[in-house]
Amino acid sequence: MANETPSNFIHDIIEKDLSEGKINGVYTRFPPEPNGYLHIGHAKSIALNFGIAKKYGGKCNLRFDDTNPTKEDVEYVEAIKEDIRWLGFEWNELRYASDYFEQIYQLAEKLIMDGKAYVCDLSAEEIKQYRGTLTEPGKDSPYLDRSVEENLRLFREMRAGKYKDGEKVLRAKIDMSSPNLNMRDPVLYRIIHASHHNTGDKWCIYPMYDFTHPISDALEGITHSICTLEFEDHRPLYDWTVENCGFEKRPKQIEFARLNIKNTIMSKRFLKRLVDEGKVDGWDDPRMPTLCGIRRRGYPPEAIIEFCERIGVAKANSEVDMALLEHCVRERLNETAERAMAVLKPLKVIITNYPEGKSEMVDFEINPNKPELGARQIEFGREVFIEREDFSLSPPPRYHRLTKGGMVRLKGAYIIRCDDVVFGEKGEISHLLCSYVENSRSGQDTSGIKVKGVIHWVNARRCENVPVIKYYPLLNPDVQEGDFMERLNPASKEVYENALVEPYLAQCSERSRFQFIRVGYYIKDRGAFSEIVGLKDSYKP
């Protein structure tokens, strides 16, 4: 594309750090929690972290922040790996935060011995009440002044499994009057008696994300810890943890605006609810904004990366129109997809003056953007099917398709005229009786007849019935308020059971992509052809 890549303030920071000698190289990481499938919003973070490493000749780790065993699963771990590789990236090292549990635990004991952490018996609700508000300072825990020896003993007993879930926590001793609520003696460890996907039953205490993440970054030598804006208020705690745990090389946390797409669900919790309640056909339903969903839908990974580059990296949250993503997909497919013909709502046409039993092969261009691919041949005969919408008894103004007494060209074949309309018993149109202009064949036309309309078709005797599926937004764009489940679009999936395609499509391999001319871009998926994106581009640069 000719568009310039938007400016990137993170690149500016990294280049300044390199020029001033603050770092010798660049090391980033992509740190998902394996508690669900990644969605299109994560693609921005993936492209950013791996892209930065590539741009500056650095490294990028894939690290699973697996500190909550009750929500995480190996299924999600493997799905995330597949998503990243599909987007075209490969990590330098595969890490798990749980790999560092022993080191994190030892650092927690160091904080206790330094008088910077204590065991607290307050419940989660009591801790919330003691924390205060944005306008009122918090209150010290009644357990704040426990001795170092008692805190060590209690913390070790927590590790040994002596206490129940929620009975005790380890908290940092910082400042209960801090204007930043995250600094008001945050919880560092909690008790969870649950098996972990990576460590099994070795642990019954687990470090909190805000404690684990900076330590993991520091242990791996990450230079720039890039995260979304909701972690901006957590940065003082990130820096406090790295400093008080004694790390000399300290990663720099940089926040950027997360990707939000209009009228699109961008929450793993909500997406999981759609799956659990059967509102969609699984995590990889082509209507889902999950990476596995859009992969199944047929979006090329290159288009996703292009989309991320086009929206750029900002410091303020905003919403992007889905039309931009579809625009990137459409541009990529326009260059790469083969052209083919399919009729979703068939209407039979009998060409009465075409000899019975005769057929001929006509040329059909594979991709006009790649003339080197040439053409393939399609059989033409006396009976064809056209789209029912390509015929009208009462055409509106500027209607250039077929009408009674009107003429159109059948793509790659002949000009035909509709001579008569045959109706069924219920008054519906049964089929059309047409005639063709013999010397009007495409590429050999000597008829001198000019027609404005060109329509697609399939040979009635040489076609295959394959279901065709069209998709629409999961959320109804006309309903902007209420619970998102109430906003679900009941007509987000439309199946054309009687669709007909040329034989070539029925024989092509699974996952083949095509432009059905005048219809849209489609992919062969599990015995059907499902829509990737329509032909009409509503994006306005």
Image: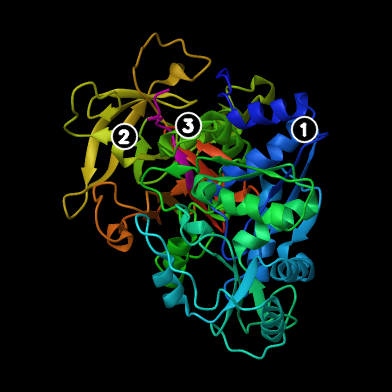
What residue is drawn where x is 34% and y is 17%?
Answer: 452
Q: Is residue 361 visible?
A: no
Q: Residues within 10 Å of mark 2 (few under 14, many from 20)?
A: some
For label 3, the residue is 327
Secondary structure of the residue carrying tag 2 is helix
Residue 237 magenta-drawn? no
Q: Alpha-carbon distance for marks 3 and 2?
A: 26 Å
State the residue lying farthest toward the right: 24
Tell me which amino acid carries mark 2: Asp
Q: Is residue 539 magenta?
A: yes
Tell me where residue 189 appears, x and y as whole percent. Answer: 62, 72
At label 3, counting other C-alpha atoms closer than 10 Å, the crowd grade (few under 14, some 14-19, many 20 or more) is: many
Foreground mark, 2 or 1?
1
- Asked which secondary structure carries label 1, the reply is loop
Q: Nearer the viewer, residue 477 or 379?
A: 477
Give the mark nearest the N terminus, 2 or 1: 1
How many neighbours does mark 1 have within 10 angstroms: few (below 14), some (14-19), or many (20 or more)? few
Dot placed on the residue nearer the N-terminal end, 3 or 2: 3
> Can you tell which mark lies on residue 22?
1
For this rendering, which residue is in front, 302 or 186?
Answer: 186
Task: Tell me, for residue 156, which label it has, or none.
Answer: none
Where does the magenta region start and end? 531-541
Kind of residue sitting beneath label 1: Lys
In percent of width and height, residue 404 lies at: 22, 29
> Which residue carries the number 2 mark?
390
Above or below, 202 against 52 in this view is: below
Q: Nearer the viewer, mark 1 or mark 3?
A: 1
The residue drawn where x is 81% and y is 48% is 92
- Nearer the viewer's eye, disc 3 or disc 2? 3
Looking at this rendering, what residue extends furthest in the bottom direction? Answer: 162
Considering the numbered disc 3 on the image, is that residue within a helix, a strand or a loop?
helix
Dominant secondary structure (helix, strand or loop) of the stretch shown in magenta: loop
